[in-house]
């Protein structure tokens, strides 16, 4: 015997009420009155012939029947949503929303976006900055760039940039202290630190340098602020070579020695598998991959005004 399906609105009211365990909150979510939600639930209970909620102490709780009914109802809504997203033909002009970490967006992405806009004038870009993993279905984000290991279950992940950490400083600081001859000389330099103050320790250790003492100097939990402090001459810092390539090439920063440290983390382009091949998403994927592969101009090496102290006999 085939049962007649309950009304969709009644199922939506049940799912929302069960999720919130509140008729009022469900009504707010569905943009209807609490009375309307109560009537929809009552009609569903009459249709099924069972009570879906228990009411006690001014609260509501799922009955045994409600607890059994909720998972398949919730799963059915999820399947309908997923199927709709796969079948629906998305508009491929208009806005492409890109979520990127603030430092990557400001230092690398935004200075290069004109190239994408020139190549794809029919696509308008919207860049939002965030460090949290995007909720693609809720936030309306098409693609995201994140700093991590590239393991994002259920999402397509494409490496954009390997993070090669190099020591850098402002030219004025190099002129004052002299270009270091060896990495060990940076132990005497003023340094700007990341939030947990471990980057310099790890970098020195990778160069075989031990006993560097406590990490002194200011620290920042935002790489953009750290870069600003370095540009203002407050100390040397460890930053991704690819992200500060323009600052190096144009002489705003100086790479202090020709040694680097490859992070386990990298920058990845992330998007849902279902939208990976949508024309505007594919266009951005192809563009950012090509842009990341471009050879940047060789950094201009600042000639210091005076030699390093170790060479001056101090």
Image (tube, grey):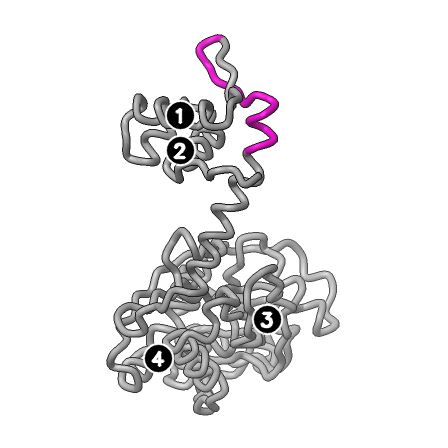
Which of the numbered marks, if any, corresponds to residue 112?
4
Mark 3 vs mark 2, CA separation in Å: 68 Å
Q: Return the disc, 3 or 2, that comes first in the chain's sequence.
A: 2
Asked if one can make out residue 246 in the rendered structure from this viewpoint, the answer is: yes
Mark 4 vs mark 2, CA separation in Å: 50 Å
Q: Return the disc, 3 or 4, that comes first in the chain's sequence.
A: 4
Q: Tell me which residue sits at (50%, 27%) in the image.
A: 48
SS state under label 1 = helix
User: How busy is the neighbourhood of tag 4: few (under 14 within 10 Å), some, or many (20 plus)?
Assistant: few
Q: Return the disc, 2 or 1, that comes first in the chain's sequence.
A: 2
**Residue span colored magenta:** 57-69
User: How busy is the neighbourhood of tag 1: few (under 14 within 10 Å), some, or many (20 plus)?
Assistant: some
Q: Return the disc, 1 or 4, that comes first in the chain's sequence.
A: 1
On screen, residue 231 versus residue 94, left or right, reads right
Examine the structure image and report whether residue 174 is included in the region drawn in magenta. no
Comparing labels 3 and 2, the label whose residue is closer to the camera: 2
| Contact flag, marks 2 and 1 (Cβ < 8 Å) | yes
Mark 2 vs mark 1, CA separation in Å: 7 Å
Closest to the observer, 310 or 105: 105
Circle 1 residue: 43
Closest to the observer, 215 or 123: 123
Mark 1 vs mark 3, CA separation in Å: 75 Å
Comparing labels 2 and 1, the label whose residue is closer to the camera: 1
Image quarter (top left, top right, bottom left or bottom right) of the C terminus: bottom right
Q: Position of residue 141 (x, y in %)?
A: 39, 60
Q: Tell me which residue sits at (45%, 23%) in the image.
A: 46
Asked if one can make out residue 166 in the rendered structure from this viewpoint, the answer is: no
Mark 3 vs mark 4, CA separation in Å: 32 Å
Q: Tell me which residue sits at (73%, 61%) in the image.
A: 211
Which of the numbered marks, if any, corresponds to residue 186?
3
């Amino acid at each position: 015997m085939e049962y007649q399906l309950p009304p969709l609105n009644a199922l939506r009211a049940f799912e929302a009420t069960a999720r919130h365990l509140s008729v009022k909150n469900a009504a707010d979510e569905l943009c209807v009155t609490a009375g309307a939600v109560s009537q929809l639930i009552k009609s569903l209970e009459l249709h099924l012939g069972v009570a879906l909620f228990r009411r006690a102490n001014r609260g509501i709780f799922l009955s045994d029947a409600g607890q059994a009914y909720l998972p398949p109802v919730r799963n059915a809504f999820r399947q309908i949503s997923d199927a709709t997203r796969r079948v629906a033909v998305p508009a491929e002009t208009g806005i492409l929303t890109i979520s990127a970490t603030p430092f990557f967006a400001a230092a690398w992405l935004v200075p290069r976006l004109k190239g994408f806009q020139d190549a794809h004038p029919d696509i308008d870009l919207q860049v939002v900055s965030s460090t949290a993993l995007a909720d693609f279905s809720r936030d309306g984000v098409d693609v995201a760039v994140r700093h991590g290991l590239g393991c994002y279950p259920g999402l397509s992940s494409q490496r954009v940039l390997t993070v090669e950490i190099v020591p850098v400083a402002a030219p004025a600081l190099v002129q004052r202290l002299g270009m270091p001859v060896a990495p060990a000389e940076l132990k005497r330099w003023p340094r700007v630190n990341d939030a947990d103050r471990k980057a310099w320790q790890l970098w020195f250790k990778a160069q075989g340098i031990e006993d560097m003492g406590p990490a002194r100097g200011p620290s920042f939990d935002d790489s953009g602020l750290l870069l600003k402090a370095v540009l203002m001459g407050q100390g040397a810092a460890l930053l991704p070579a690819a992200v500060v390539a323009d600052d190096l090439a144009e002489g705003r920063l100086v790479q202090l020695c020709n040694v680097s440290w490859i992070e386990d983390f990298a920058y990845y382009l992330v998007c849902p598998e279902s939208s990976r091949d949508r024309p505007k998403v594919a266009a951005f994927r192809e563009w950012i991959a090509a842009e990341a592969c471009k050879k940047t101009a060789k950094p201009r090496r600042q000639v210091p005004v005076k030699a390093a102290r170790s060479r001056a006999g101090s």
